[in-house]
Image (spheres, rainbow, N blue to C red):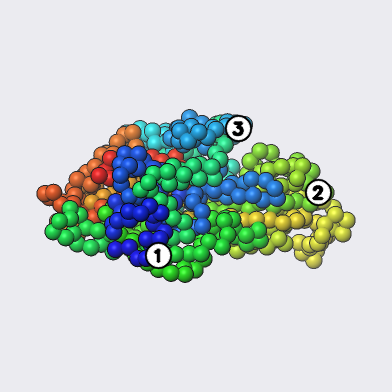
């Protein structure tokens, strides 16, 4: 049953049913698109999207800093790879605007990547594919025990010194602890080595347009400031075909629509403390949230499916530079400038005339380190060190606001002066998939990514759980690619094994999003999972 508060929020229409057809948890692009596609197929269904933040979009938002629109989370699309994203933008009437091609890395970096690919093909039977999901066939003769982290694999192939150079030039660390097999097939290492053409994405317009499409259906509704904190399942009654999900929904006051404050880090998905808690019932549940939020909402029998998916932090920091220092800063930054191993990792000029710079684009350990140093003094020092500008700025008494001394034995030098900054922090900004032989304290084998993309219709009976485990095990040796059909084949096998016998069905719960895709860290991956799960939501 709906509580009175829910009745007022869930629908403005007069006919409010006790149980909705679908509850979508998460109002990012994946959750909104899932709701929209379901309503296109079933306009009569009651579909409700719950988003904990005061706005939709999740990690795909833009914000305004110093008069400029900047990316708070996701950045650009990739021409030729993010085909679903480009098609969705056109479907919603939004422009796909190409940008300048990225820079080509030097011959040494290309040679390092070629060596990694050669070894991956020898060891794993694949490795030429990018994040688009196109891969060679897997080598069924290789055991999961052969899989290691990308860090271990890279150091073994290139050696410590060359691997450190490879990672420094890459400017990303989010794949270091990931499965080497998964990374070589799907990560898209070539995106950071070879030149490619990005396209701009109007993230706010995209998510707002999807929300408007959902709300345009009489039975569709998107609720912001509503965080789902728990899901309990009721056994089906005699006249019901499946169990009913009771969602515990915490209502949050939406004090601000801004993704973060200007002087401290925060996530666009953050929200205030709950002001009330109510219940909402649905026949089907779709989880479209980061894995750390997803895991406690899954039934216990499904949690092993995401045991090896790990979230990791991501941060962007923008700053306005003092006018007298901006020429030197702009001169030192060319395009998207990699400054690793400095924790800022990557920098770029947003607008030279207004002295607006993205001073940090960091993930993984670097993001964890940086978020603890978000004060203007420390950021000034990091920017100065990253661009090697200390000696070029002269004495601090002449051009800087503060003077610093590296040590008592060296002369004082100035730092780049920052007037203001703004940080956007995500505790689970991207995800990675651990090696197949990792256990993390559990005895469950690591199922192939995609085996839980559309995990649906589970029964509590032990026999059904064993059938699911057997289906996943049998599918483990198949080609691990969306178009090699592991996503569709395994999802279908899991769904059929868990569906139960006779007309009655098990718990109708599904998962979508970047966290459970091969396209780790890209919106394209989230859209892939929506396509994969849609045939199973019946």
- Residue bearing mark 1: 5
Residue 119 sits in quarter: top left
Q: Quadrant of residue 530?
A: top left
Nearer the viewer's eye, disc 2 or disc 1? Answer: 1
Q: Which mark is residue 55?
A: none
Q: Are marks 2 and 1 in contact (CB under 8 Å)?
A: no
| Of 457 and 48, the residue lying toward us | 48
**Residue at image x 40%, y 68%?**
277
List the residue tagged with mark 3: 99
Q: Position of residue 14 (x, y in %)?
A: 35, 54
Q: Can you say which quadrant of the picture contains the C terminus? A: top left
Evaluate if marks 1 and 3 touch, with contact meaning CB atoms under 8 Å apart: no
Residue at the location (11% across, 49% down)? 502
In the image, residue 50 lies at what x, y percent? 41, 56
Quadrant location of residue 375?
A: bottom right
In three-dimensional space, the C-alpha distance between marks 2 and 1, rounded to whole angstroms, equals 52 Å
For label 1, count other residues whose C-alpha is less than 10 Å away and answer few (under 14), some (14-19) or many (20+).
few
Foreground residue among 39 and 233: 39
Q: Residues within 10 Å of mark 3 (few under 14, many from 20)?
A: some
- On the question of residue 85 being in view, the answer is yes
Q: CA distance from mark 2 to mark 3?
A: 27 Å
Q: Position of residue 56 (x, y in %)?
A: 49, 51
Q: Please, which residue is most extreme toward the left here?
A: 502
Residue behind mark 2:
323
Q: Secondary structure at mark 2?
A: loop
Q: Earlier in the sequence, mark 1 or mark 3?
A: 1
Q: Which element carries disc 3, helix, strand or loop?
A: loop
- How crowded pointer 2 is (Cα within 10 Å; few <14, some 14-19, many 20+) is rated as some
């Amino acid at each position: 049953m709906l509580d009175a508060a829910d009745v007022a929020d869930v629908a403005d229409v007069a006919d409010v049913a006790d149980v909705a057809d679908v509850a979508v948890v998460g109002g990012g692009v994946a959750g909104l698109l899932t709701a929209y596609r379901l309503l296109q197929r079933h306009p009569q269904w009651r579909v409700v999207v719950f988003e904990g933040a005061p706005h939709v979009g999740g990690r795909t938002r833009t914000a305004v800093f110093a008069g400029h629109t900047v990316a708070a989370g996701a950045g650009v699309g990739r021409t030729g790879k993010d085909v679903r994203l480009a098609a969705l933008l056109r479907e919603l009437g939004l422009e796909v605007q190409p940008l300048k091609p990225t820079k080509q890395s030097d011959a040494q970096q290309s040679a390092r990547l070629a060596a990694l690919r050669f070894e991956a093909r020898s060891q794993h039977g694949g490795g030429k594919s990018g994040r688009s999901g196109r891969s060679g066939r897997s080598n069924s003769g290789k055991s999961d025990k052969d899989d290691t982290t990308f860090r271990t694999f890279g150091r073994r192939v290139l050696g410590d010194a060359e691997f450190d150079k490879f990672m420094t030039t890459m400017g990303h660390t989010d794949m270091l602890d990931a499965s080497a097999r998964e990374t070589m097939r799907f990560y898209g290492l070539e995106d950071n080595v070879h030149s490619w053409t990005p396209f701009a994405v109007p993230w706010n317009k995209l998510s707002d347009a999807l929300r408007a499409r959902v709300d345009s259906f009489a039975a569709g509704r998107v609720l912001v400031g509503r965080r789902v904190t728990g899901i309990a399942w009721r056994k089906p009654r005699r006249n019901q075909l499946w169990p009913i999900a009771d969602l515990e929904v915490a209502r949050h006051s939406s004090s601000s629509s801004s993704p973060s404050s200007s002087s401290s880090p925060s996530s666009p998905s953050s929200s205030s403390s709950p002001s009330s808690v109510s219940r909402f019932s649905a026949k089907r549940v779709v989880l479209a949230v980061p894995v750390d939020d997803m895991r406690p909402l899954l039934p216990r029998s499904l949690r092993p499916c995401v045991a090896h998916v790990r979230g990791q932090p991501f941060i962007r920091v923008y700053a306005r530079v003092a006018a007298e220092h901006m020429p030197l800063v702009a001169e030192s930054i060319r395009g998207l400038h990699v400054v690793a191993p400095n924790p800022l990792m990557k920098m770029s000029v947003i607008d030279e005339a207004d002295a607006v710079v993205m001073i940090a684009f960091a993930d993984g350990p670097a993001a964890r380190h940086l978020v603890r140093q978000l004060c203007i003094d420390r950021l000034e020092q990091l920017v100065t060190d990253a661009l090697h500008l200390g000696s070029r700025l002269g004495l601090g008494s002449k051009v800087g606001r503060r003077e610093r001394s590296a040590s008592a034995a060296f002369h004082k030098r100035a730092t780049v002066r920052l007037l203001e900054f703004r940080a956007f922090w995500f505790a689970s900004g991207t995800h990675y998939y651990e090696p197949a032989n990792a256990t993390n304290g559990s005895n469950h084998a690591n199922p192939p990514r995609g085996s839980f993309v559309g995990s649906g219709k589970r029964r509590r009976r032990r026999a059904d759980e064993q059938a699911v485990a057997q289906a996943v095990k049998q599918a483990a040796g198949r080609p691990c690619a969306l178009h090699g059909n592991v996503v569709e084949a395994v999802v279908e096998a899991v769904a059929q094994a868990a569906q139960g016998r006779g007309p009655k069905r098990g718990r109708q719960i599904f998962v979508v999003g970047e966290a459970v895709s091969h396209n780790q860290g890209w919106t394209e991956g989230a859209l892939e999972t929506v396509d994969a799960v849609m045939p199973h939501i019946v």
